[in-house]
Image (cartoon, helix red, strand yellow):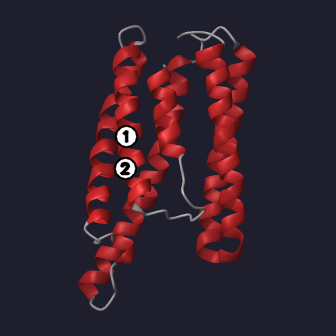
Amino acid sequence: MINIFFGFLFIFFKTNLSFLDIGITYSITNVIGYISIFFGLKELGREHKRLVKLKPYVIFMVVYSSVFFLLNVTGNSPVKLGMSSALLSFIAIAGLFCMIAGMFMVFYIISAFLEGLDGEVGRYDSMRRLEKVYKAMMSLFFIAGICFFFFPFLAKPMMAILLLTKGLFLYEFYQVFIRGRKV
């Protein structure tokens, strides 16, 4: 379980409050985080068969994050491409949509993980609290995305609140799965 905790810690690690953090640090921490989650799922999958279904999604995100890491290292991030031609504009817009879809994938993985362990954790109230924090985190992410595109002056404050919510999620995750009970 500690591998999954550290995986989420690396994925949630942000060096700035931009909605579209496309830097090298962001990409490499995602790669490390998803690899850590993969090994955590591999370990937990022996006892909790419902978690095995997450492995393909996590493998996809390792590959996805690695591709974006390589694009960032080479200076070819889709968001930083110029829009001087129709092809470059298409690539930049497609890359932007892929980045946003990748951001939502982490929420799917968290949701499926919590669902896979629901009922197997002895601390019902703590698990419900963790699920509420997860839902708040996802809602804040959605609102921050809307702010980024339509109300840019609100995007950074929303990302700061989201970062605090991610910290609260990690705290609750630790309380439920690591400190409270080994699953």
Residue for point 29% across, 63% down: 73
Tell whether 103 sits left or right of 151: left
Query: Can I make out residue 89 in this image?
Result: yes
Give the percent coordinates (x, y) of residue 151.
68, 75
Residue at 31% x, 58% y: name it: 68
> Relative to the observer, which residue lies in front, 75 or 51?
75
Where does the image place residue 27, in percent across and percent down from the top left? 38, 54
Cα gap from disc 2 to disc 1, whole angstroms = 6 Å
Q: Callout 1: few (<14), some (14-19), or many (20+) C-alpha neighbours within 10 Å?
A: many
Q: In the rendered image, which residue does mark 2 sit on?
A: 28
Work out whether residue 111 or residue 173 is closer to the camera in this orientation and state it.
173
Please name the amino acid that badge 2 sits on: Ile
Q: Is residue 154 above or below residue 82?
A: above
Q: Is residue 130 left or right of residue 7?
A: right
Instruction: Name the residue: 44% across, 25% down.
Output: 3
Which percent across, then down, holds residue 98? 37, 60
Residue 65 place in picture, x, y as percent: 33, 50
Q: What residue did someone put label 1 on?
A: 32
User: Amino acid type of disc 1?
Assistant: Ile
Left or right of residue 25, residue 168 in this image? right
Specify few, some or many for label 2: CA neighbours under 10 Å numbering under 14, 14-19, or 20 or more. many
- Secondary structure beneath dot 1 equals helix
Q: What residue is at 31 percent from the left and 56 percent from the top? A: 69
Q: Are marks 2 and 1 in contact (CB under 8 Å)?
A: yes
